[in-house]
Image (tube, rainbow, N blue to C red):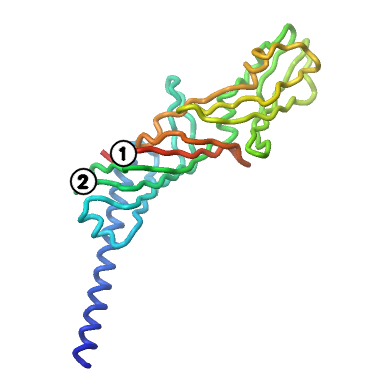
Amino acid sequence: MRALRILLIVVVILGGLFVLADRLAVGFAEDEAAGKLQANENLAAAPDVSIKGFPFLTQVASGTLDDVEVGIKDYEATTGTDSKTIRIDDLTANMKGVEFSGDYSSATAATATGTASITYAELLKTAKSEPTQVAPGVTASVIGLSDGGNGKIKVAVEATILGKKVPEPVYVLSSVTTQGDTVKVHADTLPNFGGADIAENRARAITDFEQKIDGLPGGIQLDQVQAAKNGVEIAVKGSNVRLAG
């Protein structure tokens, strides 16, 4: 019995040491991956990297990590227009089947899915906010975006008729969709500017707009988009997503 107790104590101690070594190793790997991703994507701050699954050391031995979660608080995505960028908030991506080199200088995920958001204030920068003529004597511009409920965006349009500003903004509900790497906002109905006769293409030149978003981390891409309380919520996906290297 004494020998059995000693054996059990040894097993428990070795098990504890293994768990400690495993957690130290995963912490080191997470820090290394975060540093590489920060450098690759030119991020202002290191992202959060969490390597899931236990034990980590057996995953290391296989050269593939089962599940890695990456979180980036703020990311400036390119828009394909000169040096203009758009801020993506709370980007979280779950990476599956991450193959990596021994020194963590390169890491590529077989697949990735995730979420992010764009505030209405940020998306408003895309809309036509400068007064634009839509009919003789009538100018209009988008002055605000907000949640319209049921997955719609409420677009506030301000109009000036014959030099006099219409007292209250005109509101229209708009659908938001994605097409490739572009977010599109399309009015469900057209605004009525005090009964002025405005051609549809003129009205839509104000109410409808789109924003290209490319250069997301690791090559992930837009999947779906929906209007929410504080902004547009985005689903992203990708394959052969590069975390480092």
Identify the residue at image location x=28%, y=55%.
Answer: 28
The residue singled out by tag 2 in the image is: 101
Q: Front-most of 25 and 187?
A: 187
Dot 2: what SS?
loop
- Dot 1, crowdedness within 10 Å: few (<14), some or many (≥20)? many
Q: Quadrant of residue 54?
A: bottom left
Point out which mark residue 57 bears.
none
Q: Front-most of 243 and 173?
A: 173
Circle 2: residue type: Ser
- 171 versus 7 height, above or below: above
Image quarter of the N terminus? bottom left
Dot placed on the residue nearer the N-terminal end, 2 or 1: 2
Identify the residue at image location x=24%, y=46%.
Answer: 100
The residue singled out by tag 1 in the image is: 242
CA–CA distance in space, label 2 to label 1:
12 Å
- 54 versus 8 height, above or below: above
Percent position of residue 163, x then y: 77, 12
- Dot 2, crowdedness within 10 Å: few (<14), some or many (≥20)? some
Q: In which quarter of the image is residue 220?
A: top left
- 61 versus 153 height, above or below: below
